[in-house]
């Protein structure tokens, strides 16, 4: 009886927490995914895996230049070989076809904010 009750509670929690978890972007190895970064809308990217993950992203934008603010919420990682630790922030500019190399440690969580005026698209492949 206790096992059945435990299973029901776990399944119920999964259904209840599913929509909340869908708001964050999770990186996994071997993925090819497109992310949208709307202007001034913070997007959180998390590595829930037990190992480091790397992504190479090609930026698409209609602007000549778009500033992005990266803020590390948890753990640490790299953006284009620029090391960032927990609570660090890093501002950089991107143009159309810019390549971003992102490395995230296990458990890392980073928030990206597009400070430009139009939506940026990032086509990413992970390893």
Image: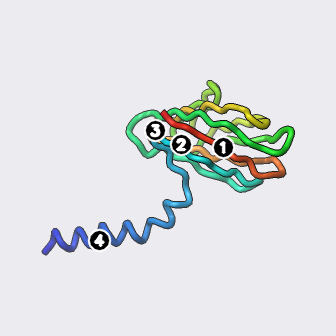
Residue furthest left in the image: 1
Looking at the image, tell me whether mark 3 or mark 4 is earlier in sequence order.
Answer: 4
> Going by the image, does 73 lie left or right of 30?
right
Q: CA distance from mark 1 to mark 4?
A: 37 Å
Residue at screen point 69% across, 50% down: 37
Q: Residues within 10 Å of mark 2 (few under 14, many from 20)?
A: some
Q: Nearer the viewer, mark 1 or mark 4?
A: 1
Looking at the image, tell me whether mark 1 or mark 4 is earlier in sequence order.
Answer: 4
Residue at screen point 24% across, 68% down: 7
Instruction: Kindly state the secondary structure of the residue where label 2 is placed.
Output: strand
Q: Nearer the viewer, mark 3 or mark 4?
A: 3
**Total marks drawn?**
4
According to the image, label 4 marks what residue?
9
According to the image, label 2 marks what residue?
32
Residue furthest top in the image: 81
According to the image, label 3 marks what residue?
30
User: To which quarter of the image does residue 49 belong?
Assistant: top left
Q: CA distance from mark 3 to mark 2?
A: 7 Å
> Going by the image, does 91 lie left or right of 78?
right
Tag 3 and tag 4, C-beta contact below 8 Å: no
Looking at the image, tell me whether mark 4 or mark 2 is earlier in sequence order.
Answer: 4
Tag 2 and tag 1, C-beta contact below 8 Å: no
Q: Is residue 117 above or below residue 18?
A: above
Q: Residues within 10 Å of mark 4 (few under 14, many from 20)?
A: few
Q: Quadrant of the N terminus?
A: bottom left
Q: CA distance from mark 3 to mark 4?
A: 32 Å
Instruction: Kindly state the secondary structure of the residue where label 4 is placed.
Output: helix
């Amino acid at each position: 009886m206790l096992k059945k009750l435990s299973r029901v509670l776990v399944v119920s929690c999964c259904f209840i927490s599913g929509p909340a978890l869908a708001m964050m972007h999770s990186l996994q190895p071997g993925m090819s995914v497109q992310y949208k970064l709307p202007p001034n809308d913070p997007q959180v990217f998390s590595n829930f895996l037990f190992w480091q993950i790397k992504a190479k992203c090609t930026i698409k934008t209609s602007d000549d230049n778009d500033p992005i603010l990266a803020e590390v919420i948890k753990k640490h990682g790299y953006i284009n070989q620029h090391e960032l630790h927990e609570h660090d922030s890093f501002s950089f500019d991107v143009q159309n076809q810019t390549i971003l190399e992102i490395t995230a440690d296990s458990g890392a969580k980073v928030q990206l904010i597009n400070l430009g005026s139009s939506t940026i698209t990032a086509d990413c492949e992970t390893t």
